[in-house]
Amino acid sequence: MLKREEGYTVFEYLYRDAGNYKAWGSVLLSGRATAEDEAALRSRMDSGAFFVAEKVGVPSLQRELWKWSDGPTEDDHGFHEFHGFREATQDDLANFACSKEEFFNRFVNLIQ
């Protein structure tokens, strides 16, 4: 499914509650993601963009919004949204998470 390529990719995602308040996050991956990789990953997500962060080992961003509301609200739900991939910068390299292959396998293993 994936080609092994050198370099680093950033997986960018967000949490958008029912009130449309947003919190952004990212995960640094070793390996360069291609357009084909993005299409393959989107095929494993609800409506090509939505996933439950905890199920694939990605930090949940819901709590980022709770600091503005003193905790959970009726606008909260479980889905996060994939924004896209981008090439990593030097600043990103301080936050290495895992390989691209390991990360993609988390999504593949959701649907068996």
Image: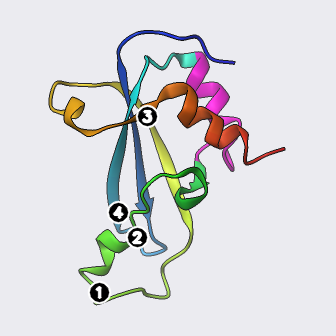
Drawn side of residue 4 relative to residue 14, left or right: right
Q: Secondary structure at mark 4?
A: strand
Q: Earlier in the sequence, mark 3 or mark 2?
A: 2
Residue at (43, 17) in percent of width and height = 32
* Spot occupied by residue 97 in the image (x, y as percentages of width and height): 38, 39
Q: Secondary structure at mark 1?
A: loop
Residue linked to disc 1: 69
Over which residues does the magenta segment extend? 36-49
Nearer the viewer's eye, disc 2 or disc 4?
2
Q: Quadrant of the C terminus?
A: top right
Q: CA distance from mark 2 to mark 1?
A: 11 Å
Q: CA distance from mark 2 to mark 4?
A: 9 Å
* Spot occupied by residue 1 in the image (x, y as percentages of width and height): 69, 18
Q: Residues within 10 Å of mark 2 (few under 14, many from 20)?
A: many
* Spot occupied by residue 42 in the image (x, y as percentages of width and height): 63, 36
- Hey, which quadrant is residue 104 in on the image? top right
Residue linked to disc 4: 22
Residue linked to disc 3: 98
Nearer the viewer's eye, disc 3 or disc 4?
3
Kindly identify which numbered label has been placed on residue 5: none
Q: Secondary structure at mark 2?
A: helix
Nearer the viewer's eye, disc 2 or disc 1?
2
Q: Earlier in the sequence, mark 2 or mark 4?
A: 4
Residue linked to disc 2: 62
Q: Is residue 43 magenta?
A: yes
Residue at (58, 50) in percent of width and height = 56
Q: Earlier in the sequence, mark 2 or mark 1?
A: 2
Q: CA distance from mark 1 to mark 3?
A: 33 Å
Amino acid at circle 4: Lys
